[in-house]
Image (cartoon, rainbow, N blue to C red):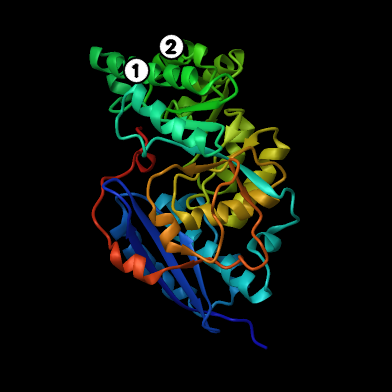
Amino acid sequence: MNSPTLTHIDSQVLHVSSKTNWWFVRVRDSSGAVGWGEGSLNGWEPILDALTEHLRDPWLGLSLEQARQQLQVAPATGLLGACVLSAVLQAVLSLQAQHAGRAPHELLGALQRQQLPLYANINRATLERSPAGFVATARRAQAQGYNGFKAAPFDGLTPALCATPAGRQRIDHGIDCMLALREALGPEARIMVDCHWRFDEPHALQTLRALEPARLHWFECPLAETRANWPAMRRLRAAAQAQGVLLAAAETQVGLASFQTLFDEGLYDVVMPDVKYCGGPWEMLQIAQRAADSGVQFSPHNPSGPVCTWHSLQVGLVAPECAMLEVQFEESELTEQVSLGVDLQARGGCLHRPAAQQQVQRLEPAVLAAHPYQRVPPGIDSQPPA
């Protein structure tokens, strides 16, 4: 029997909120099977659609294994190209798993764990951007079994603004929010702050020290991830380690080679590859393996829709180590409505290995049709300051 070949690739957008679209890729093969991938990058959906149309013709006719081997990210791919490639490769893994009658993780490697710890990204669900607002969202997550919580409370801050009175006000407000979370959630909670590349080095150091009473688990993306900032990043890492805090970053890095540079340079305690940016499931697993070899924690970035969550789970189940998986808390009920066939319900703050009858993820056409594309602003994750 001939191996199935790719016959159709298109993109679908689901509008989630005023800030968020989920961008999906649908891949059909010659057997009629359909696999789904996700490359959500807020504000860039029309360009991703056009890029998919531009790239797909040479891919049609490839066998699934040929697609897996040939659709590889490279330094010149860029974030937009990596989104398309990563999404298509997720779909290819789904198709291969369907034809093998196995869960996707079984095609990636040997099972290392039965469940994956989660942490709740409470940022988008917190509409009241005050200490009390962040605490209210975190308490809801805590009541659902989460013990890890991440917030990004430095709204409107930029490196250029840090030294100004307006910048100081924004920094102080963010510090107040994080201190309130520690007080409300108790001593055992893991609390993380996402800085979204908003700081310069002096103010990142000052903020880190001011947050010492919050007993952070990690300090994430304080500076733009440019070569010029590598010395500053090493100094920040040393300062964080002196407080017992991990330095985390690298969510928009593309490909194993980029991550290897970070390992070689000794910049971070935690890397956060994203399955929708880094090059897809196989590339993410290689990054996880190299992180383990380098003594760096692997914690997938995933403030995303249900397809990324599904594929991140598959990688996390077989990775040598996987500290935690991020999930976007309470952003939308559409997760449960659009994703069919698999169990993505958190239980006890974890996602669990899929049951034998829940191995193929499908997206509900009626939900996709009911929530078509609407323009949203570019996300901060797609525009780190230079």
Residue at (55%, 59%) from the top-left corner? 72
Residue highlighted by disc 2: 206
The quarter of the displayed image where residue 50 is located:
bottom left
Residue highlighted by disc 1: 171
Q: Looking at the image, is mark 1 or mark 2 nearer the viewer?
A: 1
The quarter of the displayed image where residue 130 is located:
top left
**Horizontal placement of 148 versus 42: left or right?**
right
Residue 226 in view (yes/no): no
- Alpha-carbon neighbours of circle 1 within 10 Å: few (<14), some, or many (≥20)? many
User: x and y percent of residue 28 in the render?
Assistant: 49, 77
Quarter of the image with the C terminus is top left
Q: Are marks 1 and 2 in contact (CB under 8 Å)?
A: yes
Amino acid type at circle 2 is Gln
User: x and y percent of residue 32 in the render?
Assistant: 51, 82
Q: Nearer the viewer, residue 132 or 200?
A: 132
Q: Is residue 94 above or below residue 225?
A: below
Q: Is residue 294 above or below residue 378?
A: above
Residue at (28%, 60%) from the top-left corner? 46
Residue 236 in view (yes/no): yes
Q: Is residue 183 above or below residue 91?
A: above
User: x and y percent of residue 203 in the render?
Assistant: 39, 15
